[in-house]
Amino acid sequence: MYLLGYIPNDNRLYLGDKELNVSSFSLLLSVLEYQTAVMRRDFETADKVLPTIPKEQRTRVAHFLEKQGFRSQALAVSCDPEHRFELSLQLGELKIAYTLAQEAQSEQKWKQLAELATSKCQFQLAQECLHHAEDYGGLLLLATSAGNADMVEKLGQTSQATGKNNVAFLSYFLLGEKEKCLEVLINTDRLPEAAFFARSYLPSQVSRVLQQWKESLSKTNKKSAESLADPAEYENLFLGLREAVLTEQFLEREQQGSRPACAYPLVTANPDRNPIQEMLEAQANGEFSPQKPGVGDAEDDENTPSTQIPHKEPTPPLNAAEATPSQHRPAVPPSEEDKVAEMERELELDLENLQVDDNINTEDINLDEDLLADE
């Protein structure tokens, strides 16, 4: 093609080929002058030419500036919000990026801005951005790293309300709010996990959770539901549960308030503690008095779950129909002889209930005659 000429009024360049076909291309003289001034590093002249460039061409000029390494000038010239947001992140301009993120309301932009704010140690801005992005995992990391208990508690409430149950459970667990952890498991129909959680951390709630578990399981497998043992009925199957309930009451005093981080060196690590032994020593020294609700208290408030497990005589679950009414007498730990006798009794009951089929086909059974002769 051959250059025919340039018409400034049209801002177009005209070319033709040998077959007399004419083609025109848009070429703004102001853009050309601006780019020429930039290449010469004459920014004073470039600033004078910039107002003459149409706004629809500003973004094109900004990309040219970015390629030349002048990101700050490109950010000032560009009119594209996406391009400006990327440039503001590259330049670390938090205020400009925050304004653009508010206008866009994009989850991805909030996450990018939160990452930048964290790298700049602007944790308050990072927290706000993570809230807008609903990045509960990032909020949990930020809150635990800063040791902000109020933020963790707020995160637990917010995540539970929005259905982020894993983050809610972990937030409550870090705060030591075991009752809320248990309710999260129950409300999400994780009843088996709730029962084992209660056995480990809230032994006084085992019977309540177990009843819900049995009711839910009986809808699909009634036989399996009946096989679940309730500590209120078969206390002999839950050794140490009574002491665990008392220990739960004993540890409530420690969990009423949070300790500052500076007290960490003074706190005994959990693996080095024996809570049950501590409870027994405190009880022996008169420093701890277990709460034992009477019969009248239970009748006055039937909806309040009791923190004590009613005492009953050890009864094997395989023959619960023969259980005798509980007698009000102090619990005596069974001796080794009693345990052995109890196991033999359960074995006899199993043998009595064992049904053997008389129609067993023994034709395919091969017996070694030499071995039989030796015996």
Image: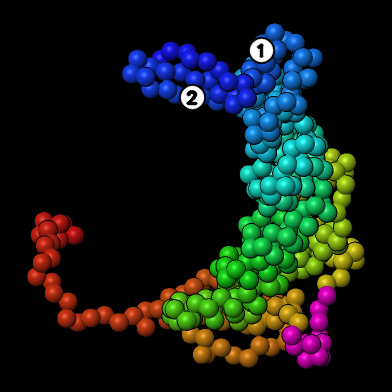
Disc 2 and disc 1: Cα gap in Å? 22 Å
Seen at 69% across and 65% down, the residue is 161
Give the class, few, some or many, for how many residues have Cα within 10 Å of label 1's Cα (few <14, many ≥20): some
Query: Looking at the image, which residue sits at the far top?
Result: 40
Query: Element under label 2?
Result: strand
10 part of magenta stretch: no
Relative vertical location of residue 167 with respect to residue 348 in this rendering, above or below: above
Q: Earlier in the sequence, mark 2 or mark 1?
A: 2
Seen at 50% across and 77% down, the residue is 217
**Residue located beneath label 1 in the image:** 36
Q: Please indicate whether residue 62 sits to the left or right of residue 367 in the image.
A: right
Q: Position of residue 251 (x, y in %)?
A: 80, 61
The quarter in which the C terminus is drawn is bottom left
Camera-side residue of 332 and 188: 188
Query: Which coloring applies here?
Result: rainbow
Camera-side residue of 164 and 210: 164
Kindly tell me whether residue 25 is visible in this rendering.
yes
Q: Please indicate whether residue 367 sits to the left or right of residue 42 in the image.
A: left
Q: Mark 2 near mark 1, Cβ–Cβ under 8 Å?
A: no
Kindly tell me whether residue 314 is visible in this rendering.
no
Q: Please indicate whether residue 357 sits to the left or right of residue 9 in the image.
A: left
The dot on residue 48 is none
**Residue located beneath label 2 in the image:** 24
Q: Position of residue 8 (x, y in %)?
A: 62, 21
Give the class, few, some or many, for how many residues have Cα within 10 Å of label 2's Cα (few <14, many ≥20): some
Q: Position of residue 6 (x, y in %)?
A: 56, 17
Q: Position of residue 3 (x, y in %)?
A: 47, 13
Question: Which residues are drawn in magenta?
Answer: 291-303
The kind of residue on which mark 2 rests is Ser
Camera-side residue of 185 and 313: 185
Camera-side residue of 13 and 341: 13
